[in-house]
Amino acid sequence: MRGWGVAADYRPAREVGGDFYDFIDLPDGRFVIVVGAVTDKGVPAALVMAATRSVLRASAQRLIEPGAVLERVNEHLCPDIPENMFVTCLYGVLEPASGRLVFANAGHNLPLVALGGATSELRARGMPLGLMTGMSYEETEARLQPGAQLLLYSDGITEAHDPGREMFGGPRLAAAMAEAGGGDGGRLIRALLERLRAFTAAAAEQEDDITLVAIRRLPAAVELADFRLESAPGNEREAIARVELALAGEGLEPAQMEQLKTAVAEATMNAMEHGNGFDPERPVRLTVLASAAEVRVCISDHGLGQGDLRAAPRPDLDAKLAGQQTPRGWGLFLIRNMVDELHEHGDDDTHTVELVLHRDARRH
């Protein structure tokens, strides 16, 4: 989804669990975000979860308002759900172009929004699904600004305990989210799970299913340069010079600029050699973008070779010196470690690598 980043992580407490999340495309370009949890673990919870998800998906194609969707799902679940079991669920409809989010909440954990180092909660009232018929669900609207990060989660993280039986809790989660700062959702989720691991430390085992869904509206960016270079050895130096010139007024720390230049050189060489086969008729395209939060360099080739950065082996100095590992991989290792985020995407004709540096220079 252009202009947005989405990441998720699901960790059941047993082999199967009762947490769930889903993304559903709607015909008008909007999309649905769902996260929920069944009040049990194991096979019984998994069966109820599957039934709930199925009704949610069917309802999303017929009903527009999130509150109406939850009402229908609740009426469907009440007659058949096992005794002493219910489902909490957050159901939202996002309009990507505007950032408008309309949502209803059936007793689920309150979503968190982080922007500019501060966090806030999104509130809407409603009873959990499956408890009693005739329930209505309040709808609330929020607007996610460029750079905002939305976090949906289950109580498996907030109700986790340390060895002294203190709960991780919502305030600790919100503080950890604020401290994680900007960046993609994957980075945020990793930071939260690392904080949770440090908190639970010697606790015996994971107590409940854990679900984390992070949705970020990418900061508005200005295009500073867009150029093509012939796929020829040595042209990576021209790429470095033109990227540095484009970013001359952007206030990057010298160490950041040097790291970015190294990554640009390696990625451009990889694109020329492995993506375009040094074919002079197939140029490499570089686009330089900048926003208040980050700078981004996109390097595109024609995807003829093994351009996938994940395919390269992790460099092992001893193995390379012994001739047991291919020389390929050092450049890709540098790219990964010189930038804050590395993304790849493509189609049948084009392969693109995106190098992202956050303006927050603490990492550097």
Image: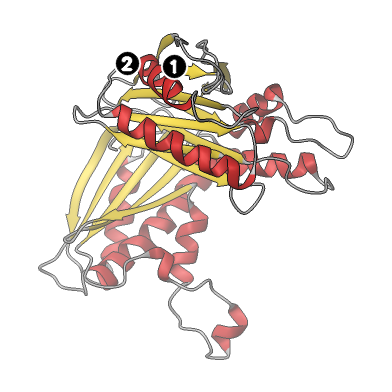
In the displayed structure image, the side of residue 262 where residue 47 appears, left or right: right
| Secondary structure beneath label 1 | strand
Q: Residue shown at 47%/37% (left/top)?
A: 21
Q: Residue shown at 66%/50% (left/top)?
A: 14
Q: Quadrant of the C terminus?
A: top right
Give the residue type at disc 1: Ala
Viewer-closest of 21 and 289: 21
Q: Residue shown at 42%/36% (left/top)?
A: 53
Q: Position of residue 190 (x, y in %)?
A: 59, 44
Residue linked to disc 2? 65
| Secondary structure beneath label 2 | loop
Residue linked to disc 1? 104
Colour pattern of the rendering: secondary structure
Q: Position of residue 184 (x, y in %)?
A: 46, 39
Q: Earlier in the sequence, mark 2 or mark 1?
A: 2
- The reply to whether discs 2 and 1 touch (Cβ–Cβ < 8 Å) is yes
**Above/below status of 102 relative to 34:** above
Can the viewer see residue 294?
yes
Can the viewer see residue 364?
no
Could you classify mark 2 by the number of other residues whose Cα lies within 10 Å: few (under 14), some (14-19), or many (20 or more)?
A: some
Q: Position of residue 321 (x, y in %)?
A: 57, 87
